[in-house]
Amino acid sequence: MVKRINDTRFTAWTRNNLREIWKTRGRFAAILVIILLGVSFFSGLLATKPAMIKGANNYINNESNMYDFRFLTTIGFTEDDIDFYKTLDGVTAVEGSYSVDFFADTEYDPGLTTGTAVGSEKILKAYSITKKINKIKLISGRMPTSSNECLVDASSIGEDAIGTTIRISDRNTNHTKSFFSNDKYIVVGTCCTVNYLNRTRGTTALEGGSLDGFIYMLPDAFASERMTELLIKTDAVGDIFTDEYENRISYYEDAMQTALADHAKSDYDKLRSEAQSKIDEAWQEYDSKYDDYTKSREEAEQQLSDTLKTLNDGKEQLDRAQQRLEDAKEAIESGEKEYRDGLRSYDEGVAEYDRQRETALGRLYEAQGEIDGNRRSIEAALELINRSDAAETYAAMQARLGELEALMAGIEDHNSPEYIAAYEEYQFLQKQMELIDESGVVELYQQLLDSQTKLDEAQAELDRQREKIMRELDMAKAELDKAKIRLDDAVFQLDNARMQYTEGLINYYESKSVYESGLKQYEQARTDADEQFASAEEQFKEARSQIEDSEAEFQEIFGTELRTYSLDRSSNSGYISFENDASIIEGIARVIPLFFFLVAALVCTTTMTRMVDEHRTQIGTLKALGYDDGKIILKYISYSGVAALIGCILGFFGGSVVFPKVIWNAYKMLYDFGEIGIVFNFTNGLISLGISLLCTAGATFIACKRELLDMPADLIRPKAPKPGKRVFLERIPFIWKHLSFLNKVAARNILRYTRRLIMMLVGIGGCTALILVGFGVHDSIANVVNDQYETITRYDYSINFTDDMSDADRKNFLESSKDMLDECVFVISDSVDIETGKGNKTASIIATSDPDITDIVRFSLNGEVIAYPNDGGVIINEKLAQLADAKVGSKLTIRLNETDTVEARVDGIFENYVYNLMFMNEATYKSLFNNDVGYRMAYATTDSEDVYDTSASLMKMSGVSTVLVTDDVRAIVSDMMRSMNYIISVIILSACALAFVVAYNLGNITVVERTREIATLKVLGFQSNETSSYVSRENIIITIIGSVLGLPCGFLLNQFVMSQVNIEMISFDIKVLPLSYVYAFLISIALSVIIALLLRKKIDAINPAESLKSVD
Amino acid sequence: MCAFVKFDKVGKVYHSGDVNVTALSDVSFEIDRGEICVIVGQSGAGKTTLLNILGGMDTLTTGNVYLDGVDISGYDTKKLADYRRHDIGFVFQYYNLIPNLTALENVEIASQLTRSPMPSQQVLRDVGLGERMKNFPAQLSGGEQQRVAIARALAKRPKLLLCDEPTGALDYLTGKAILKLLQRESRENGMTVIIITHNSALTAMADRVIRIKSGTVQSVVKNEVVTSVEDIEW
């Protein structure tokens, strides 16, 4: 280097200048680096927004040809409408497109982005691919070529879905289904679209509230007749977000709205009447057909009922016949019984007769025998007597006695002779006989005769008895015979009856089978008729529901007033939030870099002023040698100018490329499009060059001018050293007395060069402030994740169910998940738009009446617990409250749809960082929204070690549609925060670099400026550590003061910077932790210690003999 | 009695790139305690180098230097600083006062380094600045500043007072007053004073005169008749 400088091609002048640079390369490099850092930070941060916008502009305007206006109506559009709108003033192109939100059954694995499992139900929005306007950008796979293929959302679904099928879920309404020409679509690629510039997919009217992604299909994949929206391109040119473009758009705005409203109105009326008459006709046709049907049905019914009547009559007859038969059967049976009884008693009678006869005959026989025996003995005795004739004489006497008696009996006059004669005879005889009797013979004979008589009597008796018995027996026999005859007659009669019965039975069965076949025929006819009626009814019902469907559709389309929307790009949330995000960068870029750059510039000014001061003698010499002022000034200006120019150019180009890239890296994850442009804002470049040169060359010029005013003679002599001054501290003896001698010296030295002191304070303070901002931003962000997921959100899962969970369902679920879940709170979840000063903000509504919600989500503000709201009240998170300017007790306006709003009373405000949330109880929800959404979600905690194990088990439970693991969400938010941290590291590192260079440079100035003083101290016998502490003491004190002053500035700057940083879904807890102050302070001190060590080398290198030199 | 200051064949070569410059070669002399010694020579003769070596601000290449019987030629920087601190008092041509300190403080900054300094205020009164102790250097005339410098050097009770062109930046009368002060210091307090100058006139006031030329000692002359400063003219 030195040799090259010594090259003789250079003049001595140039050589001197180059050698100067080489000799003071530390200072030259310091200026260069400070300018480089300042300019790169300045132009880099300022270029970030333009670079982001350039990238976005390229994507939006060039690649995609995004719409200028988007027409939407409640009735849709036709080709005719397109032709009409093409004729509007300023319109250059119109293209129609279909779109519809639907429930999709998917089979792809969406991975971490939504945290749900394979094959779950999603809410997607289907769009038709447009050719000219809003062109999609294919990310992977291929474009669809047939109507059953589709492209999916590249960022929220991703290329893993390629090859899978998306089905139109049965849950969709017929109206929704009618949009699709197929019921499933094969994913052939992924794409991104200007409709979704950022990762937010927006809300939907379908249950669930938010879209999970979009799909794109060919127009013929849609079956709908009318297009959903028209994309309008006007002759408005110009880059996005430029006034040129926006003014042109606002110029067309009203005309577009009016044209759309008018044209759509006439369309609407025509369509409405057409649709109405179609429905009316359909009703008429239906009614007349139904009448016909009713009539024919009635006839058939009549016929059938006649038949049934006939059948019933037959049945009655049959029943009667059956009854008769049964009676007959009963009679027969009783006859038979009677017969059998008679037969039995007859048989018994016969037996009795036989027995009696036997007995009677036996007795008779015995009696006969006895009589016969007696007779024989009597007759024998009589024989004996007879042979004596006694018996006969006696008998004759006897007989005569009898006659006499009879004679006497016949004579009434007992005194008559006859009678006396008779009587005398009789008496004689009697005496005779008594004499015989007295002999005994007569008596014996008489006895024998008596016995014989008795025997004869007995014989007669016996014969009489026999006769009687025989007669009785004969009578009994006759009775029996009579009975027999009767029995035989009964048999005959029974047989007869049986024959008749059988005949009757045969007859009955015959009629019965006739009846039954008749019945069967009737029943068949009945069933046939019923079936016919049912199917007819079914047809009518279907026809009716078809008509009702068309009525519902009619109601859906025409039920409300015609609404038309002519939307420009500002209705696209991604478009707007991109502008916002870019503006956030601009917001940061507005203060920090300027601050940064000014510090750098001030430091350069000091450096150059010092340099010129140091060169006083040389300037005098040069002047004395005859160099004119211009040339001398040029020498110093070229020194500082070259450093500034090189630093500025490097800084400008480097910064413009590096900073936007680095920062976009952080934002890229929030947006769907990849690359940003490179923008060199030469105005900023020139401004920074101007400021750089002003602060270096300008300061040099002024310093030189001041020196050059003196005469050369004065210049050659050393400038009178700056006089020492008493400092204000000396006026406070209390402090001054207690300071050590060296501290007094330091105090006086610090205050000796006020300007440099201010420079140093600004430099160090500014850098400390920037470092603190870095930490502050980090604190504000770091707490978001920790506070949110460790303090506020206590649940491990949010579980979505496929259907509303009734009380019983919930109880069942709790019962069956008891082993897995520790706590489980069911909630109603919905998402709504809240009106704020700056447009609508999306907020999630969580409604539940389960008091355990407070165990699972912590509601607090500044350490105070916020009570869960009662009926009619809601609690909202702090950021939402800020945005909507809501306070406890005030009203919050919730947008229900394009036209209607409701108001809710704010009962409390709580800390929540991720998403805007609104909590209320079930009753409040129902009364606010008057809708029937039920408990379809639950927050749950688990005690299990592996949360994913449990989530997998939960997924398998019936009714569970998705399980969102809080750790996954936390990871997503964490990632986002990491992107912010990235920007912050850039700020902290840049600030540290600047702080380092600034402090080193200023320290260096101190050393160079006071070389002589230091040398003198060395001569006086100061040891090297004493010397450097003598110098560094000042620098460290200044650093401490500067850092301490910088901390409050940093706090304020942090507030400002954070207020400019605005990310949709996240609110920050803007704060700076005490430790961050300590860090920022310690970093500054550490930097100054490092610098003190570096300077110590320089101080050590100072030769004490320098003190002997004359002042140069 | 052994010589108080002894240079024994001292040589000094500066290396500047590839060039070797011999500043001193084979310099030998002795100075006794309490003497005023004037070292005189032209610019570039090597007298500043000699002073630097004697003052412990530079090392020598060859030879030895003794002060009060102690060899200082082998000292490292730390020992040299210590040596400067306790044994040497310096008076510079341009005073080298610390502009930010008052006269008194300038004395104190030196005296506080040593073990048994003279009271600073007394020293200042001794040099005739009793009234101006609270003044900053910028508020003092050149002569007054040089008196402060002398007071600063004396306050340490050094063994040796080294003066580098003490009158170089002063006018005639002031210069004389300073020299008188130095002479008084030597005579009254027995301070060994070495004055380096290119002004030969000053040799008259010295007890010993050493002439240097081109890095070598030309002559060492013991001055038998010492002239009072008042009588010296230049």
Image (cartoon, helix red, strand yellow):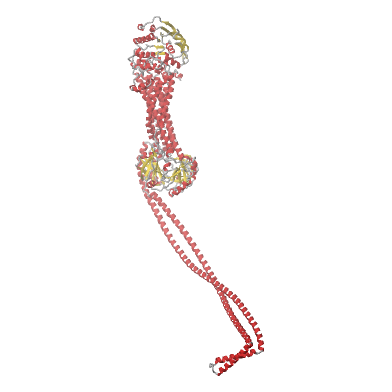
Instruction: Give how far across and how far down residue A75 sits, in percent.
Output: 39, 47
Q: Residue lying at the far top in this picture: please name it.
A: B224
Question: Observer-nearest residue: A293 or B51?
Answer: B51
Question: Observer-nearest residue: A1064 or A448?
Answer: A448
- In the rendered image, the vertical position of residue A812 relative to residue A792, given as above or below: below
- In the rendered image, the vertical position of residue A316 relative to residue A896, given as above or below: below
Residue B52 image-quadrant placement: top left
Q: How many labels were placed on the picture?
A: 0
- In the rendered image, the vertical position of residue B225 relative to residue A783, given as above or below: above
Residue A665 image-quadrant placement: top left
Instruction: Give how far across and how far down residue A122 sits, in percent.
Output: 46, 44
* Residue A1065 visible (yes or no): yes
Q: Quadrant of the C terminus of chain A?
A: top left
Question: Observer-nearest residue: A79 or A581?
Answer: A581
Instruction: Give how far across and how far down residue A630 sits, in percent.
Output: 36, 20
Instruction: Give how far across and how far down residue B112 sits, in percent.
Output: 39, 17
* Residue A676 visible (yes or no): no
